[in-house]
Image (cartoon, rainbow, N blue to C red):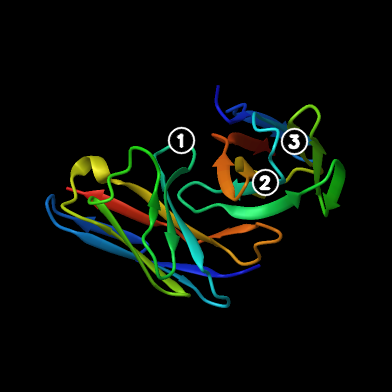
């Protein structure tokens, strides 16, 4: 079992709609959770971090964490073509980052 | 967020040569930096943790004599791919944590290595 799992996609989303990305992790001791966006050929950039159960909103992005279910998600509202990228879920377990394989999002005009 | 700079962004070399990649934290001191490798359409694979003033900690399966890491100062870590071969062609990315409390990881721009 992979330590951090994501659907690879591609997730096709109409422009203006909500994109919903999911991530599950195996280490119950994980404390910090992150979402990174990676454009093709570029390095990842941090878009959200979340540390406690519940929702965290930042602009069009909302991260949701449920430690009991070992689940973290990312919602992208009002999706734009510029949101087309691969989104990586990262989990920090005792100082060691584990990355999911990423979900490719394609926003169609 | 913190700025991590990586150089060169692209390098093409002949098989058997060595290539050095630099990673600098521009606006903060990083006692720890991380080196990742990424193949096309795959996720980041942690290669090693670079510790300032001490030896790097390598992940299982990563050859320490092949991938030399030096963390000479609080703002600079280097990765040298020795005797590079075509299978070493990949995207290499460094990262650092500015604030150990938040644990947020900031990435350099990445270095695309092509070994002919």
Q: Where is residue B51 in the image (x, y as percent from the top left)?
A: 44, 63
Image location (x, y in percent) of residue B65: 23, 51
Residue assigned mark 3: A72
The image quadrant that residue A15 belongs to is top right
Along the horizontal axis of the image, is B16 left or right of B10?
left
* Kind of element beneath mark 3: strand
Question: Could you tell whether A7 is left or right of B84 in the image?
Answer: right
CA distance for labels 3 and 1: 22 Å
Q: Mark 2 points at which residue?
A: A35
Query: Where is mark 1, residue-wise?
Result: B41
Q: What element carries label 2?
A: strand
The residue lying at 44 percent from left, 69 percent from top is: B52
Say which of marks 3 and 1 sits in front: 3
Q: Reply above or below: B31 against A21.
A: below
Tag 1 secondary structure:
loop
On the image, the x and y values in percent for residue A20 come to 76, 33
Query: Between marks 2 and 3, how big is the CA–CA gap?
Result: 9 Å
Query: Are the residues under badges 2 and 1 in a single subunit?
Result: no
Quarter where residue A9 is shown:
top right
Residue A104 place in picture, x, y as percent: 59, 35
Q: Does the rendering let one see residue B49? A: yes
In the figure, residue B13 lies in which quadrant?
bottom left
Q: How crowded is mark 2: few (under 14 residues within 10 Å), some or many (20 or more)?
A: many
């Amino acid at each position: 079992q992979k330590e951090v799992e994501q659907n690879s996609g591609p997730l096709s989303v109409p422009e203006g709609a909500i994109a919903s990305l999911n991530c599950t992790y195996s280490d119950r001791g994980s404390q910090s959770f992150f979402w990174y966006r990676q454009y093709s050929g570029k390095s990842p950039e941090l878009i959200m971090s979340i540390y406690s159960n519940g929702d965290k909103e930042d602009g069009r992005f909302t991260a949701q964490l449920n430690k009991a279910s070992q689940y973290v998600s990312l919602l992208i509202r009002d999706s734009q073509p510029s949101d087309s990228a691969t989104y990586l879920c990262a989990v920090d377990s005792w100082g060691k980052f584990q990355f999911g394989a990423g979900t490719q999002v394609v926003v169609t005009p | 967020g913190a700025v991590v700079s990586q150089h060169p962004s692209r390098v093409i070399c002949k098989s058997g040569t060595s290539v050095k990649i630099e990673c600098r934290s521009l606006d903060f001191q990083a006692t720890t930096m991380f080196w990742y490798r990424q193949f096309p359409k795959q996720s980041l694979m942690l290669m090693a943790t670079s510790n300032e003033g001490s030896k790097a900690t390598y992940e299982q399966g990563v050859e320490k004599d092949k991938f030399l890491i030096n963390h000479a100062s609080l703002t600079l870590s280097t990765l040298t791919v020795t005797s590079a071969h075509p299978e070493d062609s990949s995207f290499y990315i460094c990262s650092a944590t500015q604030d150990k409390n938040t644990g947020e990881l900031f990435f350099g721009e990445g270095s695309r290595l092509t070994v002919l």
